[in-house]
Image: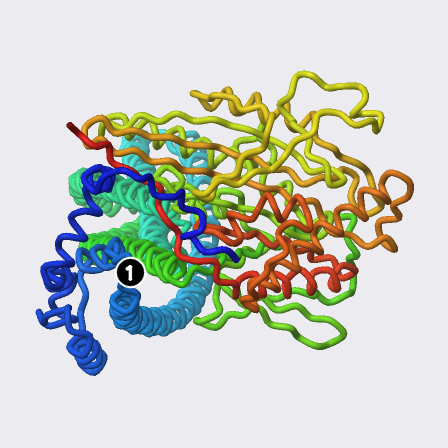
Amino acid sequence: MTSRNQNRPPRSPSSKKEGVESIPLDKRRRIGMGRTGGATNAERKPFGSVNKKLDVAATSDVGSCVEGSDCGNVEFTKEEIDALVNERLKMKKFDHKGNMELVSELNARLKVCIKWFQKRDEAHVEGEGKLQNALDALEKKCAETEAEMKNKEERFSATISELRQDNTCVQERLVKEESEKLDAIACHRKENEARIALEALQASLSKDLEKAQQDILVANQRAASVDDMYKRLQEYNLSLQQYNSKLHSELEVARESLKRVEKEKSTIMENHSTLRGHYSSLQDQLNLARTAQDEALNQKDTLANEVKCLRGELQQVREDRDRQVAQVQVLTSDVVKYKESTGESCAKLEYLMEKTKSLEETCSSQREQIRLLEHQLTATNEKLKMSDLSSIQTRAEFEEQRRNVHDLEERLAETEYQLVEGEKLRKKLHNTILELKGNIRVFCRVRPVLPDDVAGSEQPVISYPTSTEALGRGIDVIQSGQKYPFNFDKVFNHDASQQEVFVEISQLVQSALDGYKVCIFAYGQTGSGKTYTMMGKPEASEQKGLIPRSLEQIFQTSQSLIAQGWKYKMQASMLEIYNETIRDLLSTNKSSGAENGAPGKQYTIKHDSNGNTNVTDLTIVDVCRIEEISSLLRQAAQSRSVGKTQMNEQSSRSHFVFTLRISGVNEGTEQQVQGVLNLIDLAGSERLSRSGATGDRLKETQAINRSLSSLSDVIFALAKKEDHVPFRNSKLTYLLQPCLGGDSKTLMFVNISPDPASVGESLCSLRFAARVNACEIGIPRRQMTTQMTS
């Protein structure tokens, strides 16, 4: 590899004054400060707690400070971490030893910060385990209470059925007594008529007796009305008991639902909104219970008024009975007087006396029943009071449960915020470490299982480790019973959405606006989902790929930076490498000779001294809106070479390269940045035994495999740090030379298929990705200049 000094233009034979003026202002400041004896190194103090405010200029002092920070308990704040992550080392041009010391010092502080973050993560995992144990205990208690409530409900149902049977028996008895009374009244009327016909002398006495009998009938009717009232009171009492049991059951249901809400809110974060709806429904049920309780109190008042009326009527019945008793005594005296003349009617009078005695006995029994009703009414009032007290207690418990739910919601929100902040910090530190290492970042994505894949009884060939260290970063491939583990910067399973994948690379896309060269390319076998990852389905918002989402983010961010004085100019170009031939996908002049195999327009790849890549005669379009980019992408998709094989109905037969050049100027600070975003969809590697390619498809497959083989040769040479890297063996590797061997930020997506028949190709892809992840290509360099003012 050639050094950077060879790419510099020769110094012009001008005066020293002109040379000094051509040096940028920030570089002259660094040179001047370096001559004063390293004053810059003495002023850099990013962490007071790590370096203990010692002088950073001495390397030995820095090392001792870092070692001391490892031994003690170091705490970091968010501002300190941001300062450490965003810190940019001021390298001297020829002081390589000092630059290495600065880098080693920054690496040591980053190690201390990462150890502190790992301790915080372990403490968070322990807290989650404790919360899970507490939730298991609560679930056991809930199950026990549910069993007890079921037993109580069965007992209550049995008692209710017994009371209903007793009620039916009492009703049957009352019906029989009423029928007997009616029969007795009919017989008595017949006897009176016979007595009036036989004894004309005793007409007046018979009239008096008839009046007495009528009064007795009225008393019987009143007694029947009292019986009806008693029945209604019993039915109302039963309804009150049922309502009370219903209230208790509703309260128990509310308690169970509250416990269920606590369990779901502590374990399932995603169902937070549904729990709030359930919580509001519980409040509605409690309000309904309160209204029902108020109605019960009103009914209790009406019952009390009815009981007062019944007592007055009972008192009136007693007075009528006393009056009738007095009349009977008078009649008995009259009967004694007429006993001599009415010998035949004596037996009848005795019979009437017996009947009056029986009526008196029924009145006394009814009096006792009224007393029992009064006792039952008092008991019902006491039960209502107890239900009021239980409802108040339940309301207090409900308020306490609501406070607990609110506290749990606050704790849940705080935990979610800490998780999000911790994940952001982890990503930032990880990106900083990778930038310092200069490695190529590698993400792995597993395609979802399709209906055409080999399914059925076969075991899955891909698994994901669940350990804390490998969670989200590890993947295991099983072949012939043997497990092959791999670790990458990020692993997406087959359930990952397009948005989740884009979130992980959004910061890398943002670097293109900051003046960095960014390259993202997808690698994998045919049918592993590379084109879906890069392009997706632009017509569906949820299935858009990385290219449309990245461009939307760049345009949105550039619009938001206008308020800070930044103005951006963007230029887009798209090409494909088909059979080692470059094709312009945005060209409007499609020559017939090129399509028929005759030589058409020739495109040449050129690299300048600054590491920029240009393709001669390539169509470059100025873009200002996302709609223009979308139309260009549709045009390129229609022009791209796509064919059908036995492995994929729409297989990409060429390497697709999308390039977006970004130029930004800040009028306030007079800064200029130049960034490049390269998004590449490589053609898939395939085996002829599986693809069944023949004719043109066979030539395409051979050209694709040769270019991918050249890419692997370049990766092996970079991994071994050889002097010569064969970039010129293929147009693909020569086009990717600044991304693989320069100062850009590079990310590779390795796409694999979960099909058991493709496990061999998946292993080859993962091994190649592991070698790519181990390559060091240098620290990314930001392309930013400052305009010199007169």
Q: Is residue 653 left or right of residue 306?
A: right
Which residue is most to the right? Answer: 695
Q: Is residue 643 left or right of residue 232?
A: right
Q: Nearer the viewer, residue 170 or 549?
A: 549
Q: Which residue is mark 1?
A: 94
Q: Quadrant of residue 106?
A: bottom left
Q: Residue at x 80, y 42 (%)?
A: 700
x and y percent of residue 672 in the render?
A: 30, 33
Q: Nearer the viewer, residue 717 or 69?
A: 717
Residue 401: tell me if it is visible.
no
Residue 49: tell me if it is visible.
yes
**Are there few (<14), some (14-19), or many (20+) residues within 10 Å of tag 1?**
few
x and y percent of residue 243 in the render?
A: 34, 48
x and y percent of residue 299 in the render?
A: 24, 40
Amino acid type for the residue under numbered disc 1: Phe
Q: Quadrant of the C terminus?
A: top left
Which residue is most to the top? Answer: 589
Q: Is residue 576 left or right of residue 346?
A: right
Does residue 459 sit above or below 295 in this rendering?
below
x and y percent of residue 284 in the render?
A: 30, 41
Q: Residue at x 30, y 73 (%)?
A: 115
Q: Which SS class for mark 1?
A: loop
Q: Residue at x 76, y 37 (%)?
A: 650
Q: Nearer the viewer, residue 127 or 580?
A: 580
